[in-house]
Amino acid sequence: MADMSPMWRGGSGRASAGPLAGLGPPVLAQASRVVRKGSVVTPPLIAVLNGPNLNMLGVREPEKYGTATLDDVEALCAEVADELGFAIDFRQTNSEGELVTWVQECRGRAAGIIMNPAGYTTTSIATMDALLAVGVPVIEVHITNIHRREEFRHHSFISKAATGVICGLGVEGYALAIRAMAGLIAQDEEA
Ligand code: DHK
């Protein structure tokens, strides 16, 4: 198993490792849905990847993005994932290359990817290509309704790789994305 970056939540300076890195404990979900690998029972993994400036949530333009911090968003995702029997690997980076690498390393590990690409939404063909290469369901999340904002925010390269897009519902959009992803993964398993 290739290692991911030893730091996760790259931009926030938090040094805890996620299950993708194999460097620390995953946010374990209850074992209602499990994947058996030998004698080890592991809940399926959803990667929740966040792009640039989302480490500033809580202080960043709160009139648009709200007052919840990225830690609050991670706790929300972990709670919903736990309820549904999934583990999450929740990360943030300000670097496009790191985001691309994290996406690539989801191949064969994560059952789905939820991404708020933030400022890379409108620019990153590389992130789109990586998502297309991984071959798992992708849900794109934006806290704000990008279509009610400046025109340059309207076009998303990431949407071309996404099964669905959630925007404008605040950080609750992440919780909705986890629930939707659980459904997509179940469909994949049935197919
Ligand atoms: C977050 C950003 O950082 C912006 O660059 C996007 C997105 C919108 C959000 O709503 O979560 O344009």
Image: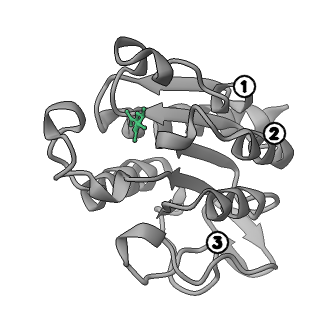
Marks 2/1: CA–CA distance? 8 Å
Q: Nearer the viewer, mark 3 or mark 2?
A: 2
Residue type at mark 1 is Lys
Give the x, y percent position of residue 170. 28, 32
What amino acid type is highlighted by mark number 2?
A: Leu
Q: Residue 51: in sight, yes or no?
A: yes
Instruction: Give the spatial CA distance, label 1 vs label 3.
Output: 25 Å
Write the residue at 58% across / 87% down. 23
Circles 2, 1 touching at the beta carbon (< 8 Å): yes
> Relative to residue 112, is residue 171 drawn left or right?
left
Check disc 2 and report its element: helix, strand or loop: helix
Mark positioned earlier in the residue sequence (3 or 2): 3
Counting other residues with Cα less than 10 Å from the Cα at mark 3, is it few (<14), some (14-19), or many (20 or more)?
Answer: many
Q: Kindly identify which residue carries mark 2.
A: 132
Few, some or many C-alpha atoms within 10 Å of disc 1 (few <14, some 14-19, many ≥20)? Answer: some
Q: Residue at x 72, y 63 (%)?
A: 101
- Horizontal and vertical percent for residue 167? 41, 24
Which quarter of the rendered image does ligand 1 occupy? top left
* Cα–Cα gap, marks 3 and 2: 19 Å
> Which residue does the numbered mark 1 point to in the structure image?
160
- Residue identified by numbered label 3: 20
Question: Viewer-proximal residue, 4 or 20?
Answer: 4
Residue at x 58%, y 20% (from the top left corner): 155
- Give SS at disc 1: helix
